[in-house]
Amino acid sequence: MNLPRMFKLPQHRTFTYRPMFHDPEKEEREARLRKIQLEEGMKESTGYTPTIQRGAMRSYFKRSQKAQKQSNVRLIIIIMFLLLISYLLLFR
């Protein structure tokens, strides 16, 4: 026997998870095969191929760390500038 409620309870969320496995030997084999086929003219270039390259995340984190450092330096400069202006306005 359900009693009427004032608030509706949220339903649980379902996610579709497909595990992605990394097989470096298979990737190297496919890359060599594509290269050979392109050289022989058997297959035309398809353009963009989305792949996860080794070290891609490492370079992403380096870029994000560099941006974080630049942001911190910019913030310090702005704070120093505001302190200088407030000093000049208050004590002169």
Image (spheres, grey):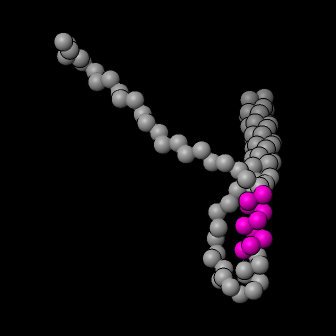
58 relative to 39, above or below: above
55 relative to 6, above or below: below
Q: Is 55 contained in the magenta span? A: no
Q: Residue at position x 73%, y 53% from top?
A: 23
Which residues lie in the magenta part? 25-34
> In the rendering, at what x and y percent does residue 87 appear?
78, 32
Give the position of the C terminus as an image quadrant.
top right
Q: Nearer the viewer, residue 44 or 75?
A: 44
Q: Residue at position x 74%, y 29% from top?
A: 90
21 relative to 36, above or below: above
Q: Main secondary structure of the magenta part?
A: helix
| Residue 60 appears in the figure | no
Q: Is 29 contained in the magenta span? A: yes
> In the rendering, at what x and y percent does residue 50 appear?
64, 63
Give the position of the N terminus as an image quadrant.
top left
> In the rendering, at what x and y percent does residue 36 appear?
77, 78
Quarter-of-image position of residue 3: top left
